[in-house]
Image (spheres, helix red, strand yellow):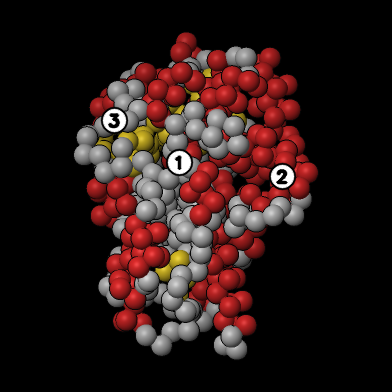
Amino acid sequence: MEAESRWGGGTRTEELTLPGFQHDVCSAVQPMAVATRFLRSLPLNQFGLRWINPPLALAHPLEGGRVAVLAESLEETCAGLGEDGRRYRKLIVPVVASWPAIERDVLGPIGWPRHLAAMSQFGVRALPPASWTARRWFKTEAGRALWAGLAAHSVLPLETWGSSAIATVLGAAAHRAGWPMAEGGSQAIADAMVGYLRSLGGEVLIGQRVENLGEIEGAEIVMCDTSPEGLLRLAGDRLPAGYRAELHRYRRGAGVFKLDWALAGPIPWTAKECSRAGTVHLGGTLREIEASERSRSEPDQPFVLLAQPSLFDPTRAPEGRHTAWAYCHVPNGSTVDMTARIERQVERFAPGFGKLILARSAWGPRAMEAHNANLVGGDITGGNNTLKQMFLRPTWRRYGTPLKGVYLCSASTPPGGGVHGLCGYYAAKRALAEVGSSGG
């Protein structure tokens, strides 16, 4: 039962600027969809899903045309890092090699690890602050900047313990399967999943907003793909006071300010490697990214995450035209317009970019939440990613609730945000096990 007029949530694609220009509303690049087992196990290719892997997963430009790249090829990545190539190899190879063994421990409910030695290797890389890891492991400006940009996906200050975890996971994911994007836009992922569900006898109702769990009495299992705030609205006083208090204490992460552009041509990057990358990190050096992600207000020089899908997928724009997608982190619920600041960062590494803009769509945190109620205050990660909160996410019950047969399965449950389907997968496994044990 989908409240909006189109299914997909964070995996929707719409004409946000001009006719014929297809823009991803939230998620644009999906490394975890192919790096994890659940979505790979579904026959989504039979329902129209096609993956596109750009030549480079990521490019991170620096002043003077210098650039660090993240490629599916470990050799290409290391070669581009020069003297830091050996250090990067030592840092990431153990995680890449052990990923099949540790995937469930890294991206599942917190528990005693099945492969203690491999998880220990992961832990010594993932737990330290990203700032410390960047300076401890890398000597060059490019190596440090590459790590900082990867870690900034955590939406945490880089001095925070655990901020290296997402950098480690995203780096390993790139070397296992690249950072692909869905042909036609992220909507294709949701469309394929709905197609598969229907083939199994399932049904999706759109424009069906549930205001109270009482509206669906009689269902043996109710899976709530909502924020903790959403569950509170749905269940109200049916939830015990203690559990309601726990949900009220759940901390949100930073918000995002997002731009989509319809462009007259490809972005004119100074560093040509950027034109081979699906994702480009625009933030400059480690120190610059630290300052941006540490800021308690809207940064003057924000770290910008940019995707340019039409370079590799001609279905996204009219012939000869292009699209680009970008966002930066801002305080949760911010009302400041970051358009000019984001575009200055793009222009910094691609002089002449502004002259290519045919139209733009700007969404601040409030607009993001209005389009998807789970993005509270513009938080796209389902909640603050601190170590303490990740252990409880969102409470000690994780997917379960005090209500029999009612489960939470959104990005506010382990393992958190991202296009991987694992929150719903693990919630469903728990629900089926409990229903089965009760004779249902």
Q: CA distance from mark 2 to mark 3?
A: 36 Å
Residue 134 in sight here: yes
- Percent x, y of residue 391: 54, 51
Q: Nearer the viewer, residue 318 or 292?
A: 292
Q: Tell me where residue 331 sits by quadrant.
A: top left
In the rendered structure, which amino acid carries the disc numbered 3? Ser
Expressed as whole percent of the image width and height from the top left, the position of residue 400 reads 50, 69
Q: Earlier in the sequence, mark 1 or mark 3?
A: 3
In the rendered image, which residue does mark 1 sit on? 309
Q: Secondary structure at mark 3?
A: loop
Find out whether the residues at labels 2 and 3 contact each other: C-beta distance under 8 Å: no
- The residue located at (37%, 71%) in the rendering is 240
For disc 2, the marked residue is 119
Q: Residue 369 at what x, y percent from top left? A: 29, 52
Which residue occupies 63% across, 49% down?
A: 106
The image quadrant where one finds the C terminus is: bottom right
According to the picture, the residue beneath numbered tag 3 turns out to be 297
Residue at x-position 76% and y-position 47%? 116
| Label 1 vs label 3, nearer the camera | 3
The label shown at residue 94 is: none
CA distance for labels 1 and 3:
30 Å
Rendered position, 265 above or below 216: above
Image spot of residue 137 (x, y percent) = 65, 22
Amino acid marked by disc 1: Pro
Of 172 and 252, nearer the camera is 252
- Residue nearest the observer in this picture, 226 or 394: 394
Using a 10 Å C-alpha cutoff, classify the residue at mark 3 as few (fewer than 14 neighbours), some (14 to 19) or many (20 or more): some
Q: Residues within 10 Å of mark 2 (few under 14, many from 20)?
A: many
On the rendered structure, is 373 left or right of 223? left
